[in-house]
Amino acid sequence: MFDSGVPGLKAKRIQVFICCFMQYAMLHSCRSTWSFTSGLLAKSDDHEHDDEKIDDFDKQYLGYINFSFLFVYGSSMLFLGQIGDRIGPKLFMLCGTFSTGIIQFMIAALLPVERHNRWLLLVLQIFNGISQAPAWPGLMAIMNNWQSKPNKVIVMGYFAACTNVGNILGDLFAALLIEQLGMSVMAPIYISAIGVLIMSVINIFMIEASSAKEYIAQFKNPNTKSLVYKQAHDEYISRAASIVSISEQSFMTDLSQTLLTVDRDSQMNPQIQPKPKKKKENSINMITAWKLPNVALYAFAFGCIKAVFYILAFWLPSYLKGENLEGVAWITQMIEWGTIPGGILICYAGVHWNLRASLIVPSLWVGTVVMVSINFLSKLDQPYVLYYILVFLTGLMIGGVYNNVSGAIVIELSNMKELKGNKKSTATVTSVVMGYGAVFAAINQLIVPYLESILFLYCSINAIVAGCFLIPLIINEYKRYKEQKTKVDDAK
């Protein structure tokens, strides 16, 4: 996965992968610790933490807080990418991670003091959204600059698990510090903030500002100026088309696996072909993008799936607390433990068989049955084992889909005849789909407080609708599969 014939490059790639992985995992742990803490603060019938609660901090107010964070976070990603292109991915990422750690500290320290100032938290979460926005596109740009092009899909598939590992860490902090040790509800937020800052300091020294291409260029014969190793030459040439700017990473924030996907034929036949003359690319506007075939369907589908993911991420602890369950943090972790293998399985299927949509839609509908089942567990006596199993299966089906659906949509968009070979228009259409998804997920944070008693039923409706909207994706995928099979048969 990280192999290279260039001396030292494999170790560099592993180092970059681990540092980037842990950096975003610690940053994401801030979200899960906040999810757990906010669920306790908003629970009106829980008097255990009354001395730490903020005035008028109810579930409707929590919905406004979560909406503000997600909306600002998504908007900032679109607009801050251009700054990252100018200052470089490493500095861009570190600006976001350091400021995130500081703001998390401020949230934990100021809320107990300013309990009567409900606007303080809203302002801090808005700044929190701005601070977290540079981290993902910056880290993705760093990863892209160091990883090998043929193995990049698999590497990015594993890297996508950093969000799940981060959520597990956050739940673990909450379980140990609040549920086991009985510490302040703000204690996990402090720990997550410290983790983000420590990893940021480590990455100042451990992540290099250069790229693999610059590292490989060191191996040149001083007399002939040619690269010493044949492997170095091959890798150096392959870097030419693989450098992606931060602004491109910003609007494709969720495309961790397949943004960088190369056609399988080009992997199997890597000979260099003469480049045709580039045609002038004419970009399209947002309104025209919505009118392209199936774009609206894909946008609605992605919005529904993203909404389900963020509803569960922000509201699952609160829902489980409302069911008067113990060990909520341990149950919440199960969704992340399910998402990791679910995402990797779909990623591998996409790489080896080019079948993503054919797995995504059935997984969504099976996940719907699982979520409906969870909604009726409250009628049973002490159904802890069932909660663990069904929440795990929800992660396996729904979380695995979320980690891959954006890539499946982008592959479909890139194959549209209206966009073929036009990178500018593809970027515009992709930003329409992803942007709508972010806005719809944010709006749902305002709806959930009124539907919390039927949380999983509401998520199930979103999943069913998303699956219906993605049916054209399966049809087109099947057509491409038949065409490829026909070409292989003809070649024999």
Image (cartoon, helix red, strand yellow):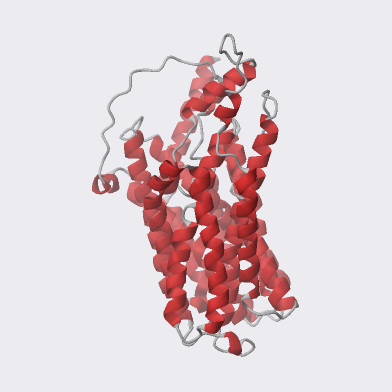
Q: Is residue 179 left or right of residue 491?
A: right
Where is residue 318 drawn, in percent x and y? 57, 76
The answer to whether 423 is drawn above or below residue 53 in the figure is above
Q: Report which quarter residue 439 is drawn in.
A: bottom left
Residue situated furthest right in the rendering:
180
Tally of numbered discs: 0
Return the x and y of residue 412 as percentages of the image width and height.
42, 39
User: Vertical placement of 352 versus 457: above or below?
Assistant: above
Task: Answer with left or right where residue 297 lies relative to residue 210.
Answer: left
Task: Please provide percent x and percent y for residue 400.
Answer: 58, 52
Quadrant, the C terminus: top right
Could you say where residue 451 lies in the image, as x and y percent from the top left?
A: 46, 77
Residue at image point 52% right, 79% down: 453
Position of 450 relative to 78 (above/below): below
Q: Nearer the viewer, residue 397 or 318?
A: 318
Residue 168: name its quadrant: bottom right
Q: Residue at x 36, y 41 (%)?
A: 427
Can see residue 441? no
Name of the residue lying farthest toward the front: 222
User: What residue is shown at x 29% (from left), y 31% (from top)?
Assistant: 281
229 or 317, nearer to the observer: 229
Q: Is residue 463 left or right of residue 151?
A: left
Q: Quadrant of the N terminus?
A: top right
From what the image shows, is residue 196 above or below residue 147?
below
Residue at the far top in the pictured view? 224
Between 445 and 301, the residue placed more toward the observer is 445
Question: Could you tell me if residue 70 is visible in this image?
Answer: yes
